[in-house]
Structure formats: structure tokens, C-alpha cells
Amino acid sequence: MPDSSTETSSVGPMRFDAAQRLFSASHVPGSSSDPATLPREIGHFQIDRILGESWGTQTFLAHRRDRDVPWVVHRYTLGLVPDEHAALRDELRRTVIESVRLRVPLEESGDEDGCPYIVWPYIPGVALDRYADRHDLNTTERIRLLTRLCQSVQRLHQSGRPHGDLKPGHVIVDAKGEVHLVGLGVSTLLRANLRDIDADERFIARALQYRAPETIDQPTVAFSIVNDQYALAAIAWRLLAGRPPHELDELRRDDAIQRCLDDDPIVSGTRQPLTPVLIRALEAAVSRTPSARPKSVNDLGDVLRSQGEQATVPWWRRLGRK
């Protein structure tokens, strides 16, 4: 799902008219966001505007007549053969049923005009990387956000469920600094072969940043806990090193894929002051070699937590001086 978050000062349930004002400038005439081309309803939800489009998906701001709060409707527009269509629809339904146990708010799923969809509450806040940059957070504060994120992802993994599409835009931070996972469902992109799909080159480059190298040519195993762990490490790299693990924006698709397959990222010129231990941990977490990475999200979270605590201790105390 594209990043559709917008910062606001309120948390908790938000009135629909307030959410409408937040997105009042999002209409682009002549694009797919033109109101004339929008669906009027999807399931029980009235569609008000498009928040973004990605390969094979569309994301809308919507509301229900019986509830004066905004919702996000995420629908899949890929042309699927009947078996694939049924599998996607059933997986979305299972995700909604599991959402209470997973502590991830999802409202419903369904199928409208041959396009499966899933719905979650609109969460007022801002994407993780934008939040950290806008508030000029220091290393300790960034690590604190990342450890909260690790805890949320680990809860999913303990249930045997991967998130499937972890990236900064799917981690929303509200005005109280609480972290919320959104975009839980089924990533059509993760199921795709990135070498072959008909998508913008820059879009592919962004997707590669959060894709474990060994899954690039194995899309059937990309929707996995292993890929979640790699994506989480790439998010940590973005927040602490100030850039993604690989610089791919100016590369053609084949060259970008080859760089991810051939090169291990090296931390250098970081925006935040990082300890040698943390630098080594980040480099290991996005290694091309799966065995070199942390064994679980908890392992990465423990390293982040210990380094965050160390960063708050004055240097003379770390040397054993009083």
C-alpha cells in the first residue's frame, strides 16, 4: 500500500469531516484520482477520495452512514485467475477473523466487482520515517520507536502470521508517539516476480529496499516471517543511518536487482551517531546471507534496546568513572 499518512494533533476516533479536510488537496484532475473514475461504494463503505495507488492495489478514504469516523479501504485490482482470486479472498477473510487475536484493527473484507478488498480504521498520525525526521529525533528516541515496532511485529510472528508488507509507510506514529501497524493483509507485490511485472522502475527500486535478497527470484516464499525480519532491519537502517540500505533510485531494474543480490550494504556517513556494535548489528541484519542475520525480531530488538540504553549513559559512566 502507498504511504497515505498525514499528521494531525488528535488521536483515537476521528470524525469523518476532519479526515476529509486533511485530504482536501489530494485530487489530481485527469489522474486515476479523478472523482468521475472512483467507485462510489465498496462493500458497506462509501468512497470519498483515493489516497494512493500502487502496483495492483488502490487505497481509498471512505465512511459508513452509520459511523461518523473515517476508514481506509484497500482493494486489489490485479487480474487474477479464478483459483488465485479465491485464494486471495479467503486469505483476506482469515486475516480479518484473526485480527482481534493479533491486536491489529481490521474491520471487514469482501469482494466487489471481482476485486477483493480489506478495510481498517483510519489512524491519524504520520509514517515512521517522516515522524522521526519532522521531530528531529535523536538516536535514542529513534531506537525507542524501533523497539516498539519490534514488539508489535513479534506479536504477529508469535501467532505464526507475517505482516507481509512492512515498510515505513505501513508504520504509523500517532501524536502520543504510539506505533501502529497498518497494511496487514496480502501484499500482491510480494507474490510477484520483480523482474517481470509491468511497474514503474522507481516503484521496483523502493520495493527492493524491503525485500530479502533470497526471495527476489522466489516470490512464493517472499510472504514470510523471514522477509518481515529483513524488512524490519531495513526500516531500522533507514531510521538510524538516514538512508535505505541500497541506493537504487538511479539504477535500471536489472541493475538494482543485481546490486541487492551481489552487495552487502555498509553503514557510512550516518545522520545519527551510532556505536560500533549497532553498526555491526545493522550490517548483519541486512546481509545477503540469511544465516548472518538476527534469528528473530526479538534478537534485533534486544540489540537495539541495549544500544539505546547505552546511548543514554554519559560517556564517563561507560568508562567506569563516577
Image (tube, rainbow, N blue to C red):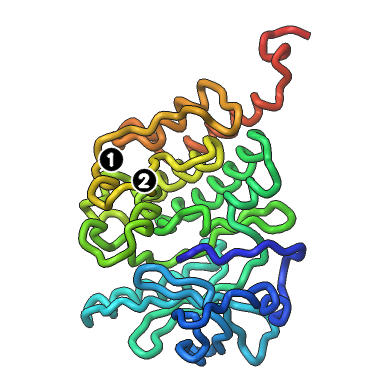
Q: Position of residue 65 (x, y in %)?
A: 64, 92
Q: Which residue appears at 40% of the width and 49% of the height?
A: 210
Q: Looking at the image, is 299 positioned above or below residue 15?
A: above
Q: Which residue is mark 2?
A: 248
| Residue in the foreground of this view, choosing between 145 and 249 | 249
| Residue in the foreground of this view, choosing between 244 and 282 | 244
Q: Position of residue 256 (x, y in %)?
A: 29, 46
Q: Looking at the image, is 178 positioned above or below residue 315?
A: below
Q: Which residue appears at 66% of the width and 61% of the height?
A: 125
Drawn side of residue 139 relative to residue 262, left or right: right
Q: Quadrant of residue 19?
A: bottom right
Q: Quadrant of residue 322?
A: top right
The three-letter amino acid code for the residue at tag 1 is Arg
Real-space CA distance between mark 2 and mark 1, rounded to the nearest whole angstrom: 8 Å
| Neighbours of disc 2 within 10 Å: few (<14), some (14-19), many (20+) | many
| Residue in the foreground of this view, choosing between 101 and 90 | 90
Task: Kindly indicate whether the residue at mark 1 contacts the one at mark 2 (C-beta within 8 angstroms).
Answer: yes
Q: Which mark is residue 272?
A: none
| Neighbours of disc 1 within 10 Å: few (<14), some (14-19), many (20+) | some
Q: Which residue is mark 1?
A: 259
Drawn side of residue 280 relative to residue 315, left or right: left
Query: Helix, strand or loop at disc 2?
Result: loop
Query: Helix, strand or loop at disc 1?
Result: helix
Q: Looking at the image, is 64 positioned above or below residue 56?
A: below
The three-letter amino acid code for the residue at tag 2 is Leu
